[in-house]
Amino acid sequence: MSGLLLAIPSIAGAAGEGFGRSLWVMTSARQAGSGGVALEDPWRQGELADLSTILLTSGLRWYGFGVQGGVGPQLRMGFDGFAFVPEGITETREASDGTYGGEGGQIALVEWGARMLVQRELLAAGEWRLAGLARLSTLVQRLPDEQNLGVGLEAGVQAQRGLGDGRALTGSVLAGPLGRGASRAFASEVTCGAGLLSQSRIGLLGGPEGYAAGLEGEVLSEGLVHGGLGLVYWFGRLAASGTTFFLRAGVRSAEGSAQTVQPRGGIGVLWRSAAGLGLQFDYAAVPIGELGWYHYVTLGVRLPQAAPAGHE
């Protein structure tokens, strides 16, 4: 299957006043553990489904579900939905001078949304592959006295160049989301990324192993600059039967957040049957300063797939 899918880093940007950075949190444990950089999913092929949960140490929890698949030889589509339904959040008040004004009662808050991605292969010539993509996202936020609705559109391109010997260079540019929410228009960010993927026949332990390393930078509409560095190393061959183990590490710089520099890490395991059916479990931990930690868990089902150039 020649269709490509870029698992775009979770949508950044507020869908209007009141939405905060809700969609920044939503991503898979695979991406969260590697510095927030999408190292594995961008060149994944075949059909797959993921079920994710994200737990903040305070007890707040997010849920997500996603599916991806090819539609013909050059078109690929993905869909995912997510929800945040806390039992209750304590109201924090602000004094007239901007200082802490104490706490109130419990606030009811519900958020849910969905995202649909369409990706089209534009070029496949020699060692080069180029694809264009677009993703439409919606987010609904229900507060005690109001309901907000946001809609955003992202667009970008990604490229891959095979280097031979199971290696490939990757690159991507993404803009957005552009859209409207809570009665105001918004434009979020531009993200650029690059990476190297490699699958070797004989690795550190004498068997098939591989790695993916990459970086990305984000320029947000409010002038902040974010970025990440990530590394994934796996023991095994991703598209072959048997068990593959993953080690992930990375760091992310998030200016203006609760923790500016975030070291991250994660682990994973993928089992494939002789027929190619795969089951995968991934975990990642992300510190967010005084707010505690995010704990990401993703369970996935992988249908039989062909090995993409330079990766699997």
Image: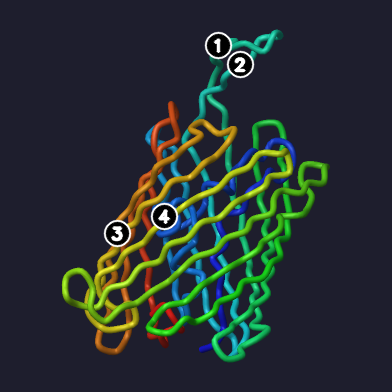
Cα distance in 3D space between marks 3 and 4? 9 Å
Which residue is at a point 67% across and 65% down the rendered structure image? 135
In the image, which is nearer the foreground, mark 3 or mark 1?
3
What percent of the width, then of the height, locates residue 41? 47, 68
Which residue position holds label 2? 93
Above or below, 191 against 256 in this view is below
Which label's residue is closer to the chain start, 1 or 4? 4
Dots 1 and 2: beta carbons under 8 Å? yes
**Residue type pointed to by label 4:** Ser
Residue 102 numbered mark, or none: 1
Which residue position holds label 3? 247
Dots 3 and 4: beta carbons under 8 Å? no
Task: Give the quarter of the figure containing the C terminus.
Answer: bottom left
Which residue is at a point 32% across and 68% down the rendered structure image? 280
Above or below, 22 against 255 in this view is below
**Residue type pointed to by label 1:** Gly
